[in-house]
Amino acid sequence: MAYFLTYTTLFSLFSTFSITIPAAFSQQFAEEIATMRLEKVSHLHFYFHDILSGKNPTAMQIAGPKKGRFGMTMIVDDALTEGREPSSKLLGRAQGLYALTAQQETALLMVMNFAFMEGKYNGSSISVLGRNPVMHAVREMPIVGGSGLFRYARGYALAHTVWFDGKTGDAIVEYNVSVLHF
Ligand SMILES: *[C@@H]1O[C@H](CO)[C@@H](O)[C@H](O)[C@H]1NC(C)=O
Ligand SMILES: *[C@@H]1O[C@H](CO)[C@@H](O)[C@H](O)[C@H]1NC(C)=O
């Protein structure tokens, strides 16, 4: 169940101003400037495959202590697919890093770009920077920017782990992303 939906919700920012400088030899009269921007909200749905095991892992540890301990830092180039199955259509890749930054629980700092490769979003990306307490059923992470069709993006992602292998650390995570952009 994959969807890429966009619709116009807001239309904002209308401003006027006037400047009058009382002076003997010059005067400025009111000038009106109107700006109208059309903002859209897009909803994206996909599955994130974090694969640490096998011959072609997409997540690799680059620093910190082994497995599941505070400080563990990974670099990822994870597939984002339309369906839950790894063989499902590739929509993009999650490229960046995550690190275990909580001492009392299993919570990650996520710093990554979701680079899309499908349809009209091919070549566009969104940037995620947030906290991911992976044991929670649903985690919310901010979208702090974007490129291409996602210029000026801001929004949030909701993540839910649909499959996890405790031995290898491999996981499949469902994402719903809501993003405002121009
Ligand atoms: C995405 O864009 C790249 C570069 O323009 C192109 O090579 C590739 O075929 C495109 N992929 C899809 C699925 O349209
Ligand atoms: C994503 O949205 C779908 C459809 O509304 C819903 O069934 C699913 O539970 C949501 N998942 C997350 C992680 O928000």
Image (cartoon, rainbow, N blue to C red):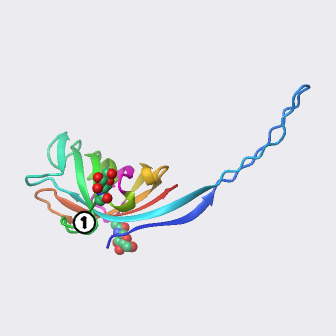
Foreground residue, 135 or 88? 88
Q: Residue at x 23, y 41 (%)?
A: 71
Residue 42 appears in the rendering: yes
Q: Is residue 179 above or below residue 34?
A: below
In the rendered structure, the answer to whether residue 34 lies left or right of residue 99 reads right
Q: Is residue 131 magenta?
A: yes
Q: Residue at x 34, y 49 (%)?
A: 113
Pinpoint residue 140: horizontal percent, then vertical percent: 38, 59
Residue 144 appears in the rendering: no
Q: Quadrant of residue 135?
A: bottom left
The range drawn in magenta is 122-139
Disc 1 designates what residue? 89
Q: Residue at x 69, y 53 (%)?
A: 14
Q: Quadrant of ligand 1?
A: bottom left
Q: Secondary structure at mark 1?
A: loop
The N terminus lies in which quarter of the figure? Answer: bottom left
Pinpoint residue 80: horizontal percent, then vertical percent: 27, 59
